Amino acid sequence: MRVITYQTEGFEGKQAVALLKHYGCSGRIISKLKNGDNLQINGKKARTIDILQEGDIVQITLDDEKTLLPNPDLKVEIAFEDNDIVVFNKPANMATHPSIYHYRDTLGNFFAAKYPDCSFRAINRLDRNTSGLCLVAKNQLAAANLSFAVNNHPDKVYYAVVCGRIADKGEIIAPIGRVDNSIIKREISENGMFAHTVYEPICGNEEYTYVRVFLKTGRTHQIRVHFSHIGHPLAGDDLYGDNVKDIGRQALHCGEISFIHPTTRQPVIIKAEPPEDMQRLIDIIKGE
């Protein structure tokens, strides 16, 4: 349960619903606030059509439901959290959402154990073997403001180790579609969806290059497919490449995420260093 209080300055003479919409409450949230005592003005039950007066205090209560099987035995580092959001530093070999093959060992199951009164609302999703930052909203309002608000989709910076030497920064623009008869694998396809990746090398040798990657679109497996397409598959990626001698999963890490906080409206930037398996590859590149 999350309780949020608003001052009504600038909304005097307007219906309460105008203030709620201004702060990002969706139609679904507003509909729920009409029931029970979840909307109050000056400590008393109120209606969304009530007219606000100078000095009024509007308070909303966001109820939530537990929807996933909790697993308290899982361990995940928390990079940042407050009453509305949590940013996890997800390890490799952990799916974000439960599935038929992973129904109690996912980030969602860890979240359910740690926050038993909250539904799991992941704002960005990482592949099971991609490590790094994953932003989760703790309530419906935070999720709406981060997922659907104009110009407030989180920006992410990825770090990858790819095979071969890349000397210069560049971009990859190539449509991505699903491989026929596969529910997992993607490929470059004329009939695929537009995909745009920007990259810049950090350091490299003849065997590997450590790169910083920015996604202009968010297609499934985009980084993995695009780098394989230009002849530089990710190290450890046995689906789109074949060099797995130095790392046992694709060398991909979401190392930075930035967004406008859904409640305070202040900019937030969170960073996380690559995990040990990727750091060993980076040390190989640097000759350390």
Image (cartoon, rainbow, N blue to C red):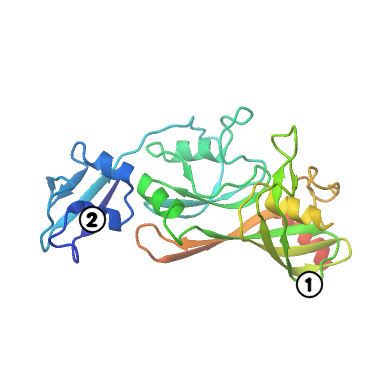
Residue 72 in sight in this render:
yes
Residue placed most toward the observer, 280 or 242: 242
Element under label 1?
A: loop
Relative to 131, 8 lies left or right: left
Q: Residue 249 has which mark?
A: none
Relative to 107, 187 lies left or right: right
Q: Which residue, given by chain and number where applicable, does mark 1 sit on?
A: 168
Q: Which residue, given by chain and number where applicable, does mark 2 sit on?
A: 18
Residue at point 23%, 58% (across, down): 6
Return the x and y of residue 110 as percentages of the image width and height.
Answer: 51, 38
Relative to 1, 259 lies left or right: right
Residue at point 69%, 34% (across, down): 183
Question: Gap between marks 2 and 1, in whole Å?
Answer: 51 Å
Please tell me how crowded label 2 is: few (under 14), some (14-19), or many (20+) other residues with Cα within 10 Å. some
Return the x and y of residue 164 as percentages of the image width and height.
Answer: 86, 61
The kind of residue on which mark 1 rests is Asp
Return the x and y of residue 44 as percentages of the image width and height.
Answer: 11, 46
Vertical position of residue 281 compared to residue 64: above or below: below
The kind of residue on which mark 2 rests is Ala
Q: Where does the N terminus fall, quadrant-wise?
A: top left
Residue at point 71%, 46% (across, down): 191
Residue placed most toward the observer, 21 or 101: 21
